[in-house]
Image: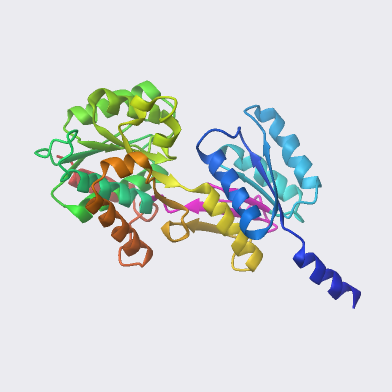
Amino acid sequence: GKAEEKAEASSDDPLKVVYLCNGNLGDKGFNDSAASGMQKLADEMGAEVKTIEMGRDETSYEGNYLDVSEQDWDMIVSGTWSVKELAQDIAAEFPEKNYLIFDVSVDRDVVTEGNMMGINYYSNQAAFLSGTLAAKMLESGDAKIDASQKVLGFVGSMDAANINDFLVGYLEGVKYVDPEIKVVTSYVGSFEDVSKCMEMTTQLYNQGAQIVYAPASQSILGAVTAAQKSDKYLIACDQDLYGELKESDPELAANVLSSSLKNVGESIYTSIKDWKEGTKTLDQDYILGLDSGAVGLAKNDNYKAIVPEEIQKFIEETEQKIIGGEITVGTAFDMTTEEVAALRDEMKP
């Protein structure tokens, strides 16, 4: 009958997806990554896509969310903790609309109608690769590395589970290569204190750390500056920091060996594709990892130039072992504070 014809017709209509960007494009980070995921939806699925740059004026955000929620989008995408409360309130207000939020978990007491998917990341898997890379590089004969020092470093923004998830993965990755390697750790105690992060990272290099891994949030520029001044390598976090800095500050970028990545764009593409195909639902949160390309290491020009080929190969083999389940990476979310502290202490020099 008519209704069936209508249903068939609508399933052929292109999917309409809008991304509310909390900021602007051109950040070379999450925003650009999310936009590339939107582009992939257009390219691979023929979706009709639109990105709305909301800028930094947060008072404008609510109006934007209301506008798109009153239009006929099939999916409304946004992300990160700063818009979580607003996005959840809007989803609760428009139960017939569909929402996806990345880099946070959805509070199901607020979004009660099952119309918002939450996407998180196996940060510990990318951190494990960072630890593996750092440990392997100690044997590389690189001029910036003192091979007699079997010490690596870790600087995190806060001593909290979401940062310690990186720590646990990193320490396990180091141990996987060589349990004899020691790791000095410190926490900035803030997400955006750049000068304190610089001071603490410098301290790690002074304590013998040959390479530092820095899940240091917005204070990471402090860590990169310390790496440049000490002429040691840094592994950055979440975004391809070398890619971000190579044009504006090539000298600063030079010491960024790699970054553990959250590939937000891949995660948006995968999640919406799976939702369209019926394998993911909006009443759930999902954690995506290496297998879907949602996390990984930045293998940019700097990485390729600095990391010897046999180490690059070792990293690829390690990735395959994680994807295949041969290596299971531990997570701080399954550990008590005491267990995390014990692992950290056991690896101190």
Picture quadrant where residue 230 is located: top left
Residue 113 lies in the magenta-colored region? yes
Point out the image quarter for the C terminus. top left
Q: Quadrant of the N terminus?
A: bottom right
Residue sitting farthest toward the right: 2
- Left or right: 122 in relation to 91: left
At 85% across and 73% down in the image, what residue appears? Answer: 5
Q: Position of residue 49 (x, y in %)?
A: 69, 49
Residue displayed at 76% across by 41% down? 66
What sort of colour scheme is used for the picture? rainbow
Residue 347 in view of the camera:
yes
Residue 212 position within the rendered picture, expressed as x and y whole percent measured from the top left: 27, 36
Q: Is residue 18 in the magenta section?
A: no
Report the front residue among 59 and 226. Answer: 226
Residue, far left:
148
Query: Quick check: 178 left or right of 285?
Result: left
Query: Residue 318: x, y in percent?
Result: 29, 59
Residues shaded magenta: 99-123
Of the pair 179 and 319, the residue shown nearer to us: 319
Q: Is residue 272 above or below residue 50?
A: below
Left or right of 9 in this view: 344: left
Q: Residue at x 61, y 32 (%)?
A: 24
Q: Is residue 200 visible?
A: no
Q: Residue at x 69, y 28 (%)?
A: 59
How far across and how far down the image is residue 111, in percent? Answer: 66, 52
